[in-house]
Image: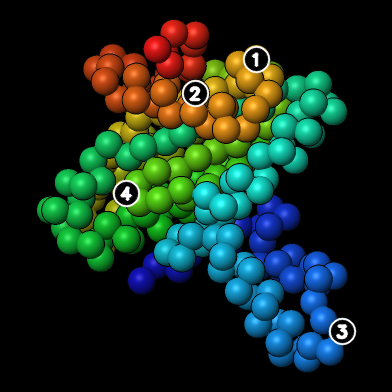
Amino acid sequence: MRKKQNVENGWGKENRMADYSFYSFEATGAQIEAMGKWKYLALHHELTDLPNRRMLHMSMKSYMARAHQQQTKLAVVLIDIDQFKEINDMFGHYVGDEFLIEMSNRLAALSEHHIQAFHLSGDEFMLLIESVDNLEEKMERVTAVFDTPFQVDQNRILVSASIGVSLYPDQSIDAEKLIYYADKAMYRAKSSIENRCRVFRPGLDE
């Protein structure tokens, strides 16, 4: 199986045991390390090693607070892989898992552009994009992930994705609403033949 790419973004493995303030002073070093590993596993997807949905909800407030402090925008981007079921049906679940790992590696590589990836479940990913002065330029980096076919277990796989975007603080200052708006925009993109990437606009939630 292809090696998963570690995410070194402040939540990487080298920092996962940074805070043990809540542990008993009587805990042994091995117990502390085990608790740290459990905490890491609880906050990352078991297959792809990306931060998971729980980590997303824990992180949103700090991302929004940083955007507020720096007077910049934060983009919340929901990605749904369009053909993932077909990949599983045609090639089997092993190839499907390998595909998700490779997809996660590509999304994780966007961190150098201040784009943090989260693996929510199955074929759904979310990105938090900081300092969105030029949304179009940032989204071009995201959509470029799907331009190159995936080579998985001697299978050449080309996929597309439906992408929904919401913006802090333009559309909301509430984390749950931003996620909801991105979801609504993603489903609108999925139903569109011409445009697979949609930014939330008032009226999409009606």
Residue 112 seen in render: no
Mark linked to residue 25: 3
Name the residue beneath numbered marker 2.
Answer: 181
Q: Nearer the viewer, residue 84 or 168?
A: 168
Nearer to us of marks 2 and 4 is 2
Mark linked to residue 150: 4
The earlier-in-sequence mark between 4 and 1 is 4
Kindly state the secondary structure of the residue where label 1 is placed: loop
The earlier-in-sequence mark between 3 and 1 is 3
What distance separates the C-alpha of mark 3 from that of mark 1?
A: 46 Å
The earlier-in-sequence mark between 2 and 3 is 3
Nearer to us of marks 3 and 1 is 3
What distance separates the C-alpha of mark 1 from that of mark 2?
A: 12 Å
Image quarter hosting the N terminus: bottom left
Q: Marks 4 and 2: in contact by CB < 8 Å?
A: no
Q: Residues within 10 Å of mark 1 (few under 14, many from 20)?
A: few
Q: Where residue 188 appears, x then y in whole percent?
A: 34, 19
